[in-house]
Amino acid sequence: NLTGSKIGHCKLAFEETGKDFEKAVELIRERGWEEPIEQESVGEGMIDAYVHGRDKKLVSLVEVSCKTDFVARNDDFRDFVHELALQVAAMKPKYVSKESIPADEIKEVMKVFKKEIEAEGKPADIAQKIIQGKLEKYYQENCLLEQKWFKDESKTIKNLLDEATTKLGEPLEIRRFLIWEFGK
């Protein structure tokens, strides 16, 4: 089996190089025994575009993946992805989710919030709550999943994603988006 041959190749390379790990790794590469790293398959899905207004100076693109082509061809899925393209054009998020924000940016944002609160002279326990509130607001403004849906502010885009996932019966992932404005 494949696993057995991988182990065998590792043992052989290790023995042939006098049990020198670094040299064994080189030998494995030289002989082509190294398995290529497979990229994770995204399955199915679609990209949708929305071009805004008569002057057509703003466009948004959104990529959403699903598991099956059955769902990718479904009108409910297509409508959901188009709603996301409209949302991106209307609300101009910077990130898909909180988790996709670079750690350095969060640190910088937190520094700004701390300086603002320190300037106000708030007690430490209250300051921490205010900073957390400011961070949540930052997420709501900059993360697509945290934004309120511009057509119904009682729902977030995460709510819409959950509803679409339930309705379509398989996991959906908002993979990425792009906003392109004329002259910017």
Image (spheres, grey):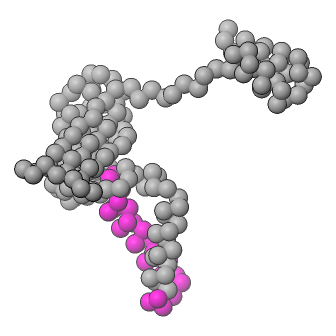
Describe residue 126's horizontal placement relative to residue 73 as left or right.
Answer: right
For the stretch drawn in magenta, the main secondary structure is helix
Considering depth in this image, is 26 or 113 the residue closer to the camera? 26
Measured along the vertical axis of the image, is residue 59 above or below residue 154? above
Quadrant in the picture for the N terminus: top right
Relative to 177, residue 12 above or below: above
User: Looking at this view, is 91 or 78 the one in front?
Assistant: 91
Expressed as whole percent of the image width and height from the top left, the position of residue 116 reads 44, 82
The residue most toward the bottom is 121
Pick whichever, 184 or 161, lies toward us: 184
Q: Is residue 29 magenta-colored?
A: no
Say which quarter of the image contains residue 41. Answer: top left
Q: Residue 77 placed where, x, y %?
A: 23, 33
Relative vertical location of residue 23 with respect to residue 103 in this rendering, above or below = above
Q: How many marks?
A: 0
Q: Is residue 128 magenta?
A: yes
Q: Which residues are magenta?
A: 119-146
